[in-house]
Structure formats: C-alpha cells, structure tokens
Image (cartoon, helix red, strand yellow):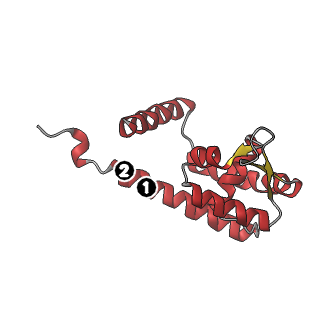
C-alpha cells in the first residue's frame, strides 16, 4: 500500500521555499548595503538573544556545523560585530558576544527581516501559524527519531 507522502515531494517544497526566502532576504540585505549574508544574520540574531553563548551551543541553535559557525564568527569579528571571551569557569572555552557595533547592526537589520517575514506570511492567520508550527515540528521529530 502506498503512503500518501510517497508521491508528495514535501521536502522539495520546504527546500525551495527556504531558498526563495533566503535569496529574497539576501537581495534586500545587498540593496540596503548591510554587508551581511543571511547566515551571518542568523548568527547575529542568535547572539543578540543569547549573549555569551558557546560556539558549540550556537552551532546547535543555528543547525550549522561547528566549522561553519567558527568561520562566520571569524568574519563577524573582522567586521567588529562579535567578540570571543574566555569562559570564567573553563579557560579552554570561549563565549561569543555581540559588540556594540554588532548590537547596532542587529537593530539596523531587524526591520528588514521583519518586513520580509510579514511579506512571506501575507494574509495567513494565527491559526494557520499554529498549524504550520505543529506540522513542521512533527516532520522535524519524525526525521529526528
């Protein structure tokens, strides 16, 4: 017996939607002269909400591998947007923070990101959002097992 999902390429639909959003957002960043990639924004946003997080935890939160996060943090540090500080309890571990310039960059970019989120969501309702989250969480759990 064929399962309904066998013939529905929902992974492709999710992937193409994500790529479309990323490309549109990157275009907005470029047009605004932000000098940021979408991946760099994701790291900045997580650091804004979680100051002093370890690189490993940041990699987990952003679902990026550790070397990628290290590269992004290095680039953001070169731009003066992030800094690493040694952890008080473990001198082998570094914690990552936004600098004042990094926090200012977050405040500058957030309205563009918010506008893109609103545009993407369009006229969908709160109920639509709850269904969307439930479905995405279910798919995530199913493939995590």
Q: From the image, tell me which residue sits under label 2.
A: 11
Tag 2 and tag 1, C-beta contact below 8 Å = yes
Give above or below for 113 relative to 36.
Answer: above
Residue 67 position, x and y percent, is 58, 60
Q: From the image, tell me which residue sits under label 1.
A: 15
Q: Quadrant of the C terminus?
A: top left
**Quarter occupied by residue 27:** bottom right
Determine whether, in the image, residue 124 is placed left or right of residue 25. left
Residue 144 position, x and y percent, is 40, 38
Q: Residue furthest right?
A: 100
Residue 79 position, x and y percent, is 80, 67
Neighbor class of circle 2 (other Cα within 10 Å; few <14, some 14-19, many 20+) is few
Give above or below for 105 relative to 131.
Answer: below
Q: Quadrant of the N terminus?
A: top left
Q: Nearer the viewer, residue 65 or 91?
A: 91
Residue found 72% across the figure and 53% down from its top: 44
In the rendered structure, find residue 97 and report the number of the disc placed on it.
Answer: none
Residue found 63% across the figure and 60% down from its top: 38
Q: Secondary structure at mark 2?
A: helix
Determine whether, in the image, residue 55 is placed left or right of residue 8. right
């Amino acid at each position: 017996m064929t399962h309904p999902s066998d013939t529905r390429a929902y992974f492709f639909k999710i992937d193409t939607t994500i790529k479309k959003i990323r490309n549109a957002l990157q275009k907005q960043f470029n047009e605004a002269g932000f000098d940021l990639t979408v991946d760099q924004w994701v790291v900045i946003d997580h650091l804004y909400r979680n100051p002093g997080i370890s690189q490993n935890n940041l990699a987990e939160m952003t679902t990026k591998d550790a070397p990628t996060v290290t590269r992004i943090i290095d680039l953001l540090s070169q731009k003066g947007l992030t800094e690493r500080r040694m952890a008080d309890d473990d001198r082998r571990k570094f914690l990552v923070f936004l600098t004042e310039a990094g926090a200012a960059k977050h405040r500058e970019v957030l309205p563009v990101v918010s506008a893109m989120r609103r545009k993407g969501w369009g006229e969908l309702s709160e109920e639509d959002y709850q269904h969307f989250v439930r479905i995405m969480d279910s798919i995530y759990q199913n493939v995590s097992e």
